[in-house]
């Protein structure tokens, strides 16, 4: 089962700047071979369910190892069985709607 | 690693009423032996990371088997390594703050 | 337009314990006269869209006033025009499904 | 108060394809003069709190007017008072961390 995920991991108890933790997550996800896209409020991930969820767990473990005592993560997860759809397809289908209406 | 999760699974392409799908998820989570609490916009779950995430996957699979072509799930996931904290502890710590101030 | 909201406000840069901020939010929401229910990973709120959103803004302002330099909030918001549905109705419709199957 | 938002609006009861509704939201947000970035699982928005929240309400209203009987939206909202930070700043701060480590 393929999944498209939007991941936003927030370390707590480490002060106000969290970019080094987000960067560490980014590297974990890349190490796992996942296709990812960083945006201003999270990271989009595409892959097989088990691989993606295993990578998210590794992110929590890595961030705790870096010293964060507490983490709260918000995640959206989309699956569909009617057809395959990539992250790029999702954006394209909206953009083509917008283009049609010009 | 223990995790506290807030799960909100939304089947798409099945019409406007989704309670039978939420009920089916509820049963999956119970079958997995997890401690759960239903609320008006999701289900709180407490357990070991792997058990919880496996159950969430089973929810997606069950809902697709019931005929939902597409699912979008929103999930919050909290982990901490400084101390153990249950779902009840989280609510109690807020309520005791409120009581202190009366 | 009525809305049912699940609000989870996370102050950042204030250490690992956030219960006093959650309690402060709780009081803001009550001061605004909203119907609310606390759960282990957020607060459910029911009311008119403008009243609810104004209260959420006041929560951010109050938490900043208490010294939190940064806040990240996750919110789910449900509206429907086919029929009216309260928070209690949502829970009841799932519970009655579960009861039917016993 | 400035806010950075990640908005993901899901119309329910309209079938499995929702791109035309996402495109309609996109246009509402642009009509309101907001700076927005579409990604594979939502739209990032930057602006003054009241302007952004008013635009989100208009999105719900527009999507209901298009015939969607029910909407569930997931939104992340970030505010900070220690310094100003744009959506581009957030991405840049992570990318510069990644670059530093090469």
Image (cartoon, coloured by chain):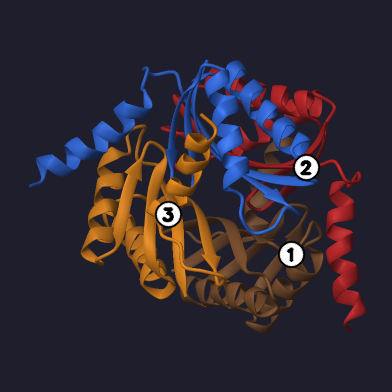
Chain colours: A orange, B brown, C red, D blue
The image shows residue B48, relative to residue C52, as above or below, that is below
Query: What chain is tagged by disc 3?
Result: A
- Whether residue B99 is visible, yes or no, is no
Q: Are marks 3 and 2 in contact (CB under 8 Å)?
A: no
Query: What chain is tagged by disc 2?
Result: D
Tell me the element at label 2: loop
- Confirm whether circles 3 and 2 share one chain: no
Identify residue for label 1: B14
Tell me the element at label 1: loop
Number of the front mark, 1 or 2 = 2
Question: B28 and B37: which one is in front?
Answer: B28
Residue A73 point in image, percent of width and height: 47, 51
State the image quarter where residue B61 is shown. Answer: bottom right
Residue A42 point in image, percent of width and height: 40, 44
- Confirm whether circles 1 and 3 share one chain: no
Residue C24 point in image, percent of width and height: 66, 30
Q: Residue at x 90, y 76 (%)?
A: C99
Alpha carbon separation for disc pair 3 and 2 = 25 Å
Tell me the element at label 3: helix
Query: What chain is tagged by disc 1?
Result: B
Question: A83 and A73: which one is in front?
Answer: A83
Residue A64 point in image, percent of width and height: 33, 56
Q: Quadrant of the C terminus of chain B?
A: top right
The image shows residue C54, relative to residue A49, as above or below, that is above
Alpha carbon separation for disc pair 1 and 3 = 22 Å
The image shows residue A100, relative to residue D49, as above or below, that is below
Residue most extreme to the left: D102
Identify residue for label 3: A89
Identify residue for label 2: D67
Q: Residue at x 69, y 26 (%)?
A: D58
């Amino acid at each position: 089962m393929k999944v498209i995920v939007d991941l936003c991991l927030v370390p707590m108890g480490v002060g106000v700047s969290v970019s080094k933790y987000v960067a560490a997550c980014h590297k974990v996800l890349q190490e796992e071979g996942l296709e990812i896209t960083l945006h201003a409020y999270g990271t989009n991930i595409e892959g097989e369910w088990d691989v993606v969820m295993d990578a998210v767990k590794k992110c929590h473990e890595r961030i705790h190892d870096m010293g964060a005592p507490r983490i709260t993560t918000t995640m959206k997860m989309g699956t569909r069985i009617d057809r395959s759809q990539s992250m790029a397809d999702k954006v394209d289908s909206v953009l083509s709607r917008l283009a049609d209406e010009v």
